[in-house]
Amino acid sequence: MSSADRSRGSQRASPGKALLLDVARQSIEWGLRTGQPLAVDPDAYPPELRELRATFVTLRRAGELRGCLGGLVASRPLVADVAHSAVGAAFRDHRFPPLEVGELDGLDIQVAILSALEPLSAPDEKALLDAIRPGVDGIVVRSGAQQGTFLPAVWKRLPEPSAFWRELKRKAGLPLDAWSSRWEIFRYTVESLP
């Protein structure tokens, strides 16, 4: 993999985008009091934070996953989407109980800003595995109402494309030993904070 490919998978954000970590934390704190995301005025932020972008927010405590939620399609200004994703990760990730006040200290927040989804077409599973860029691509698989995604950060835990793909199918509720040309498959890259 070239250094250009690596940089596309987890690009470093600009100083303006570094504000998004503060917005995420403030939104979680607001959510603890109100149950709602922080209402942000996009016009109060730099222009790059007003662009329509999709985000995921990942929460960790002591290195362990504590919540991860977001969206795949850009529907709000970036700063507002981070506020929504942060509250979703803290209180609406069905794998975890809602975050409590005592968990704020030591809470690590990561923001992933997604590129647009790019369709991946492949005649078979081998061709798909050859097309996926390990360490770079986030992948979405969709079949009707069933859908799953792994952010590029998951490559650290599942570095082999076949294992990554198999676990993504499991997450989406798809048969592990099956392939269908009707499945919709997309890739995307992220900018990561921090």
Image (tube, helix red, strand yellow):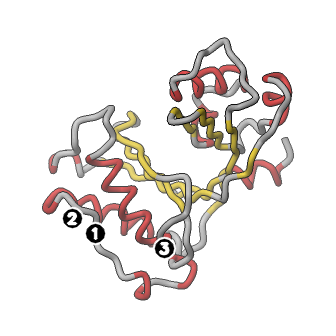
Check disc 2 and give the amino acid type: Trp
Depth check, front residue: 76 or 42: 76
Check disc 1 and give the amino acid type: Leu
Whether label 2 touches label 1, CB < 8 Å: yes
| Image side of residue 97 versus residue 108, left or right | left
Q: Position of residue 40 (x, y in %)?
A: 34, 77
Q: Quadrant of residue 163?
A: top right
Q: Position of residue 29 (x, y in %)?
A: 22, 61
Residue at 56% over, 76% down? 51
Residue at 55% over, 66% down? 53
Q: In this picture, is 106 found above or below 73?
A: above
Residue at 41% over, 44% down? 68
Q: In this picture, is 138 found above or below 16?
A: above
Q: Secondary structure at mark 1?
A: loop
Residue at 53% over, 29% down? 172
Q: Residues within 10 Å of mark 1 (few under 14, many from 20)?
A: many
Of the two numbered discs 3 and 1 on the same chain, state the one appearing first in sequence. 1
Q: CA distance from mark 2 to mark 1?
A: 6 Å
Q: In this picture, is 175 found above or below 159?
A: above
Nearer to us: label 2 or label 3 = 3
Q: Position of residue 175 (x, y in %)?
A: 59, 16
Q: Secondary structure at mark 3?
A: loop
User: Residue beneath label 2, please?
Assistant: 30
Q: CA distance from mark 2 to mark 3?
A: 19 Å
Q: Position of residue 132 (x, y in %)?
A: 77, 36
User: Residue beneath label 3, please?
Assistant: 77
Check disc 3 and give the amino acid type: Pro
Q: Which mark is residue 38?
A: 1
Of the two numbered discs 2 and 3 on the same chain, state the one appearing first in sequence. 2
Of the two numbered discs 2 and 1 on the same chain, state the one appearing first in sequence. 2
